[in-house]
Image: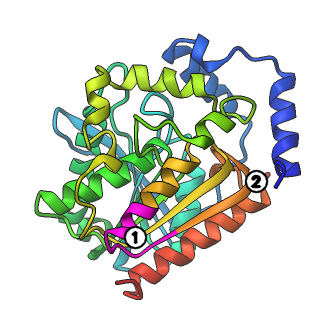
Amino acid sequence: MPVDPQVQAYLDQRASLNMPPMSSMTPEAVRQRVVMELAMVPEGEPVAHVENRTIPGPVGKIPVRIYTPEGDGPFPVLVFFHGGGFVICNLDTHDSRCRSLANGAGCVVVSVDYRLAPEHKFPAAPQDAYAATKWVAEHAAEINGDASRLAISGESAGGNLTAVVTQMARDQGGPRLVFQLMIYPVTNFLAETASLKENSEGHGLSRDDIAWFNNHYLNSNDDKLNPLASPMLTRDLSGLPPALIITAEYDPLRDEGEEYGRLLKQAGVPVTVSRYDGMIHGFFGMAYIFDKAKEAFAEASQALRAAFDGQLV
C-alpha cells in the first residue's frame, strides 16, 4: 500500500526543515539534535512510580530507569533496550514507550542505558544488555517484580540486543525468559535485502544512515559475522523464548526482521511477525501522531500479557 497519509505528512514536514543528513554529522551533533527534537514530543502517560538508579555492569555502573504500574505486585518484568543504532538515544528518548508498555502490559519495565558507540564499540552494548538482564532476574524482588515472569524487548538496535540476549541467556545458563518482543530489529549486518534497496532513501532511515551507525558501532567487517552482532547468523535458534516481531512496510530493516522470524519458526520457536503497512522505521515511538503506532502498542501489550499469564509455550 502507499505510505500512510499520517506518515507522509510527517515526512513532508521533516523535509521542509532542510536538516543535514545524519550521515554527514558527528555522533555528538546528532545526539544534540535528538535532544532538541525530544523537547517537541509530548510527555508520556503517567505511571504509578518511576525510579532512576544504577546497577553493576561489566566495566562500571549501568544507568536504568524503572517504571512500576498501578497495583500491588509482584509484577511481571520487562527489560527494555532503546533504539538509536547503538550510537544515539538514551533513557529519555524512549521514556514514553516504556510508560505505555508498563501500563499496557501491567508490568515493571526496566529501561537500560547501555554503553554507546563510538566511545564504546561492539561488544559493549550486548555485554551491558546481558548483565542488566541478569541483574533484573536476580534482584526482581527488590523492584516488586516476579523473576519467573521475565521478558525482554527492544526497538531497532534494541531489537538486536533483545535477539542477542535471548541467545546469550540460553547458552550461558540463564536467566529464563518467557518472551521476546522485537520492534523492527537489526538481525544481520551482512543483509542485502529487497527492503534495504527499496527504502534506501526518503523514508526517514536511509541506507547511508545505516552505514553511518554500523561504522561507528563495529570494529571491523569481521564483527558482522559474530552472532553477538548478527543474531541471524547463529547456527541454532532452537530453545529460544516465544517472540513477537513488529516490522514496518517502508523500513530498510523490514526484511531482515521478518526473515529472523521465519528462521525462529523453522527452529520450532513460537513466533508472530506483524508487518504494519504504510509505516516507517521508528513509527512505534510516535503514537501521538500515528494511529497504527497505537495499534502496535496494543498488540505488543496483549502479547506480553499473554506471555506473562503463561498462555504462550
Quarter of the image for residue 275 reads: bottom right
Residue 28, image x, y percentages: 50, 16
Name the residue: 37% across, 69% down. 266
Of 210 and 306, nearer the camera is: 210
User: Which of pointers 1 and 2 indicates the residue nearer the eye?
Assistant: 1
Image-based side of 138 in relation to 97, left or right: left
The reply to whether residue 300 is visible in this rendering is: yes
Q: Is residue 280 above or below residue 147?
A: above
Report the span colored magenta.
Answer: 262-272
Q: Callout 2, which amino acid?
A: Tyr
Number of on-image labels:
2
Dot 1 corresponds to which residue? 265
Quarter of the image for residue 12 reads: top right
Image-based side of 92 in relation to 284, left or right: left
Name the residue: 55% across, 78% down. 302
Quarter of the image for residue 172 reads: bottom left
Name the residue: 43% across, 46% down. 158
Image-based side of 51 in relation to 3, left or right: left
Q: Secondary structure at mark 2?
A: loop
In the displayed orientation, state which residue is furthest to the left: 173
Circle 1 residues within 10 Å: few <14, some 14–19, many ≥20: some
Magenta stretch holds residue 269: yes
Magenta stretch holds residue 107: no
Q: Callout 1, which amino acid?
A: Lys
Residue 57, image x, y percentages: 20, 41
Quadrant where the C terminus lies?
A: bottom left
Q: Secondary structure at mark 1?
A: helix
Dot 2 corresponds to which residue? 288
Name the residue: 23% across, 59% down. 236
The reply to whether residue 67 is visible in this rendering is: no
